[in-house]
Image (cartoon, rainbow, N blue to C red):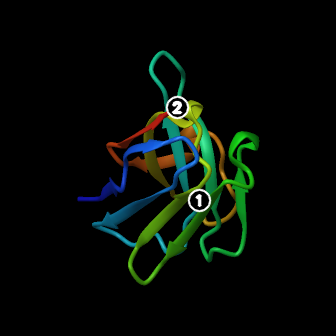
Amino acid sequence: QVQLVESGGGLVQAGGSLRLSCAASGRTFSRNAMGWFRQAPGNEREFVAAIYWNGGSTYYTDSVKGRFTISRDNAKNTVYLQMNSLKPEDTAVYSCAASLRLGGLPRQGHDYAYWGQGTQVTVSS
């Protein structure tokens, strides 16, 4: 059974930092792109970042560029999202996702086959 489990969310003041982790089990995703999405109350799910299978390429939505960094450790089957200079508008449930594509940096939800349940990130002003 494939599982993606996120951790590291919480409450932080504006300007602070959090590091999210997403541990995969049940199969390896070392040859697949991984991504992070977020959903705030009343909003649609939004793409945040994606990372190539070998970590050699990344892509971010404009609103987080320069503040967030996605990385991965294939030996641990884990992907990370380092979030710095957090803003209240970053408040959302953050979910990681695994694509079955062997290449590319997918940015659409339908390009991902497996999802975690999410971790809440709340940024106070």
* Label 1 close to label 2 by CB (< 8 Å): no
Label 1: few (<14), some (14–19) or many (≥20) C-alpha neighbours in 10 Å: some
Q: Badge 1 is on which residue?
A: 101
What is the C-alpha distance between the residues marked 1 and 2? Answer: 39 Å
Q: Is residue 93 left or right of residue 117?
A: right
Residue 31 location, x and y as percent? 54, 73
Viewer-closest of 100 and 72: 72
The correct choice, above or below, for 14 with respect to 35 in the image is above
Say which residue appears at 47% left-offset and 79% top-offset. 74
Say which residue appears at 47% left-offset and 51% top-offset. 97
Residue 33 location, x and y as percent? 58, 62
Viewer-closest of 15 and 102: 15
Q: Amino acid at mark 1?
A: Arg
Residue 110 location, x and y as percent? 55, 38
The correct choice, above or below, for 82 with respect to 111 in the image is below
* Local SS, label 2: loop
Q: Earlier in the sequence, mark 1 or mark 2?
A: 1
Q: Quadrant of residue 63?
A: top right
Q: Is residue 46 left or right of residue 76?
A: right
Residue lying at the far top of the rendered structure: 42
Say which residue appears at 65% left-offset and 50% top-offset. 106
The correct choice, above or below, for 47 with respect to 65 in the image is above
Q: Amino acid at mark 2?
A: Ser
* Local SS, label 1: loop
Image disc number at residue 14: none
Label 2: few (<14), some (14–19) or many (≥20) C-alpha neighbours in 10 Å: few
Q: Which quarter shows the N terminus? A: bottom left
Say which residue appears at 54% left-offset and 61% top-offset. 82
The number of callouts visible is: 2
Q: Is residue 108 left or right of residue 96?
A: right
Q: Badge 2 is on which residue?
A: 125
